[in-house]
Amino acid sequence: MSLTDCNHVVYQVLHCISTIIEVSNKAAINMPFEQQHFWGLVALRQRMFQSCLLLIGFLLCFAPAALSFGIQRDAYHPDCCRRQSIPRNVRTFASQGGKSGDKMATATTDQTLDLPTFDDVVEASNILEGIAHNTPVMTSRTLNDQLNCQAFFKCENFQRMGAFKFRGGYNALSHLTEEQRTCGVLTFSSGNHAQAIALSAQLLGCQATIIMPLDAPKLKVAATQGYGGNVVFYDRYKENRDDIARQIQQESGAVFVPPYDDKYVIAGQGTSAKELLESLVTDHNIQDGLDYLFVCLGGGGLISGCALAADALSPNCKVIGVEPEAGNDAQQSLAKGEIVTIATPPTIADGAQTQYIGKLTFEIIKSKVHSIITVTDQELIDDMKFFGERMKMTVEPTGCLSIAGLRKMVRQGEIPAGSRCGVIISGGNVDLTRYCELISSASS
C-alpha cells in the first residue's frame, strides 16, 4: 500500500462515518431526548465516536508498516531503471537468480539464496562459446617427476584480458536486460574483474564504471581503461568500497555486478573446470576424471564454479582451495561455520586480497570443497619462477596459489603417488618490472 493509497482509504472511512453522524444529527433535531434513546440515535453517535478512535489507533499501529511495504513495492517496480540501490552488504542483480536488478535491494537470507547449479555452468558454457577462449591444458614432465603425480594445468593466463574473470563477467552481463545495459554497469576490483567487466561491457555495448584501489597493479589499471572502463580510485586501507559503490550507483543508476558473489559470475567461472575435465577425456584419454583439483581462493567465485563442475563431471575429485597465508578468511570461515571478516591482507597475491567470502560462495564451499590450505608469498614467488623457466609462461602471484598448494600437500605426504591433479592457473596479468623484481628474490 502506497502513501496515496493510505490517504484514500482513510478519507473514505472518515467520510462514511461523518455522513452517518450528520444523518443522525438531522434526525435528532426537535426530537426529545427520550425519543432519541428510543430510536438508538444516541447509541449510534457513541458508536461512531468509538469507531473514529479505533480507526485512529489502527492507523497509528499499522500505517508505518503499510507505508514501508509500499515504499519497498515501489522500489521494485519493473519499469524503474534506477531501482538497484546497494544495501550495506552490496547485493547483486542476479544473486537470487533473476535477470532484473530489483533483487539487489533486498537483504537476502540464507533460506532464500538461489545457488547456481551445474546446469547454470552448462548454460554459461553455451553463452561463452566462440566468445571466451577454450584455454589450453598443459603438463610438465619435470613437475610430474618432482611431485610423483600427474598435474594438468588449465591455463587461464591465456584467456581474454589475461584471466579467468572474463568468463564470469561476460556471462553476468549477458543476463542483463537492454534497459539495464542502458543504465551501465558498476563494480569494484583490484584488477582482473575490473578488466573483465570493462571488456565485456565494451563487447555488449554498455558503459562500465570500475572502483579500483590506489595500489592496484598499474598494468591492470591501464588495461581496464584501455577497454573503455571509467576507473574510480580509493584507498583500500582507509575507505570502504561498498560505500563508494553505493554512492556512485545512487547517482548514476548503474547495475552493480559483484566480483564473485553472484549466480552468473560463479557459473561463468565454473566453465574453466568444465573444459579441463572434458579435455582429460578428449585429449588425454582419461575417463575417470581427477583425484584432486587445486583452485586459488579469494572471494570464492572461481572455486565455487569449479566445485560445481567437478561434482558433476568427476564426483570423486577432492576440490582444494588455496589462500595466501596472510589472508585466510575462507579457511577460518569454513572452520568456524560462518563467514569471517578480516583486515585487508598484506600479500603479493592481489587477486586474493579479499576481506571475506560471499554468501553464495560460502554455501557452495561448505558443501563441495574438501579443504582449504594456505601458502606463503615466498612459495608464490618460487612458482612464478618455475612457470617462467620450465613452462615458458608468465603467471601472476595469485595464479600461483594452486600449484603452491599442490606442492605443499605433496611435501606433507597428503597426495598419493600417481594421483591426477588439476591445477587452475587463474591469470597472468602482472607488470613486467614487478615480475622481474619478484622472481629475482625466488629461492635458489
Image (cartoon, grey):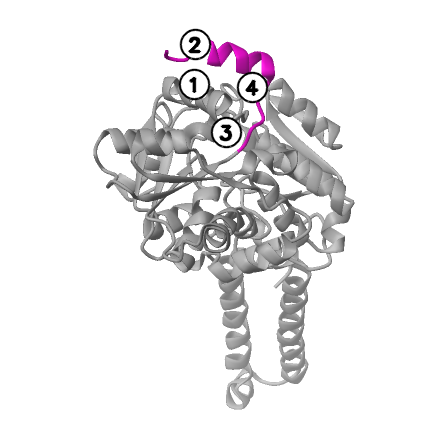
Question: Is residue 328 something one can see in this rendering?
Answer: no
Instruction: Tell me the distance, in whole angstroms, between the alpha carbons under discs 1 and 4.
Output: 26 Å
Q: Position of residue 191 (x, y in %)?
A: 59, 28
Q: In this rendering, is residue 337 above or below 387?
A: below
Q: Position of residue 273 (x, y in %)?
A: 47, 48
Q: Position of residue 189 (x, y in %)?
A: 57, 31
Instruction: Looking at the image, tell me whether mark 4 or mark 2 is earlier in sequence order.
Output: 4
Of the residues shown, which amino acid type is indicated by label 4? Asp
Is there a contact, CB below 8 Å, between mark 2 and mark 1?
A: yes
Q: Residues within 10 Å of mark 1 (few under 14, many from 20)?
A: many
Of helix, strand and loop, which one carries label 3? helix
Circle 2 is placed at which residue position? 441
Of the residues shown, which amino acid type is indicated by label 3? Gly
Instruction: Looking at the image, tell me whether mark 2 or mark 1 is earlier in sequence order.
Output: 1
> Mark number for residue 381?
1
Of helix, strand and loop, which one carries label 1? helix
> Mark number for residue 235?
4
Instruction: Tell me the distance, in whole angstroms, between the alpha carbons under discs 4 and 2.
Output: 28 Å
Magenta stretch: give its range: 427-444
Instruction: Tell me the distance, in whole angstroms, between the alpha carbons under discs 2 and 3.
Output: 21 Å
Instruction: Looking at the image, tell me whether mark 3 or mark 4 is earlier in sequence order.
Output: 4
